[in-house]
Amino acid sequence: MDFLHYQKGHLFANKIAISELAKQYGTPLYVYSADYITKQYLEYARALVNRKYLVCYAVKANSNLAILSLLAKLGAGFDIVSQGELERVLKAGANPNKIVFSGVAKSVVEIERALKVGIKCFNVESEAELYRINEVAKQIGKIATISLRINPDVDAKTHPYISTGLRENKFGISYKLALDVYRQAVSLTNIKIVGIDCHIGSQLTELSPFLDAADRILTLVAKLKSENIHIEHIDFGGGLGVCYADEQPPMASSLMKELNKKLVNYPDIELLCEPGRSIVANAGLLITKVEYTKHQDGNHFAIIDAGMNDLIRPALYQAWMNVLPEKESQNTDEKYSYNVVGPICESSDVLAYQRQLSVKQDDLLVICSAGAYGFSMASNYNSHPRPAEVMLLNDMQHQVIRQRESLEDLWRGEIVL
Ligand SMILES: *Cc1c(COP(=O)(O)O)cnc(C)c1O
């Protein structure tokens, strides 16, 4: 997170004091860097020459309209998984022609809406879905452009909860059935085959699983070609990892270049990818306040005002996220090995284990790399309003991009009997 640094003993994001942001907007507070998001997107978008390609940002990583509109202006496409995400990207100014629709449970209503706005492609995840899309398209007099999401059965070597490309996962169509399902697709009146796709997992820190998956997909593309089924685009999904602790994932540009090399024999095929985390994770941080410290039975707790409801990654995936004190710690400070815990009534509500910190009540802490799967997974559990989100527009300027929820927001739509 190159935009975070200490200056005279205090933490700054660009030239803005973290303490100022906390004072102005309150805590817990999500903060994102527009420059960082732009830089990460361009790392993908400028990687290739002489190849038609489209970078479809995976909206689920962070679906704030400000982020979506920033990316839309840069020319990004979008990978969506629900009608909610579809309406968000349209609201943000996305070109429907650059939207691909993933997800295992697309409903009739979702399919109809996507057909009406004219999305680029449905990434079909089952045989039954293929037939449903055909039926809906027939009813409203449209032709649905589709890709089959193939499960290449490769090990992404990542956490089991974010591994999606193995045979036992619910995602995609089994490699063995792929050809057969393509043949069925050919026979359907309102289906047009345009692509093939895969997505093998998230937080991948090596290139090899991507390249293995690409080989498996290309084997299929060759077989399809021999049956006169022509593929216009290959979508390699998302999943490139980021540095949370000491991981050293490949650069987005290297990934794109290596995938492009795999396509030497297919100069006309468009290359798609669906990065989420690698665009936004290290663009974001969560500022939180220490409500109390508690020392008992040899345990040290820093009890903060952000919990698993605001940021569930540590509880859900045993994710390690860096925690920085707003006040730079000095060697002479008395430190304890703290468990940094939230307000939620769950023992799993721990944001960080065993961190050497010197903190006291009302101090601020910053949880780093919180831009992806942070706010987008936040909930109101224990009736906490969700945090505000702020965008750093440049070195000095910042702006609220989502108001902090009010208490009234908590029961909107409910009734008292
Ligand atoms: C989650 C997801 C992505 C994005 O994954 P990241 O690890 O955030 O890059 C892309 N495509 C599909 C189908 C997904 O489910």
Image (spheres, helix red, strand yellow):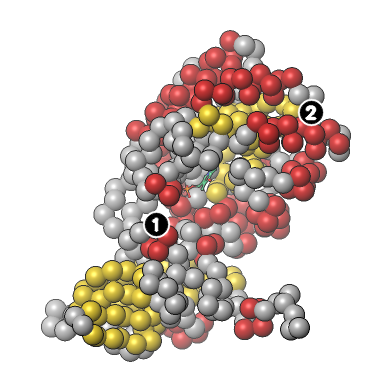
Between residue 280 and residue 339, name the one nearer to us: 339
Q: Is residue 348 left or right of residue 100?
A: left
- Residue type marked 1: Tyr
- Asked if one can make out residue 352 in the rendered structure from this viewpoint, the answer is yes
Q: Residue drawn at (49%, 22%), measured in percent from left and top?
A: 218
Instruction: Please identify the residue farthest to the top as the structure is shown.
Output: 226
Q: Is residue 297 above or below residue 131?
A: below
Q: Earlier in the sequence, mark 2 or mark 1?
A: 2
Q: Residue drawn at (14%, 79%), measured in percent from left and top?
A: 331
Residue 366 location (% of width, % of height)? 37, 73
Q: Residue drawn at (24%, 85%), measured in percent from left and top?
A: 295
Q: Residue drawn at (28%, 69%), measured in percent from left and top?
A: 353
- Could you say whether the residue bearing mark 2 is in a helix, strand or loop? loop
Residue 288 location (% of width, % of height)? 41, 78
Between residue 322 and residue 178, name the one nearer to us: 178
How busy is the neighbourhood of tag 1: few (under 14 within 10 Å), some, or many (20 plus)? few
How busy is the neighbourhood of tag 2: few (under 14 within 10 Å), some, or many (20 plus)? many
Instruction: Please identify the residue farthest to the front as the structure is shown.
Output: 417
The N terminus lies in quadrant: bottom left
- Residue type marked 2: Asn
Between residue 87 and residue 293, name the one nearer to us: 293
Which of discs 2 and 1 lies nearer the camera? The answer is: 1
Q: Which residue is mark 2?
A: 190
Between residue 405 and residue 30, name the one nearer to us: 405
Image disc number at residue 119: none
- Could you say whether the residue bearing mark 1 is in a helix, strand or loop? helix
Image disc number at residue 317: 1
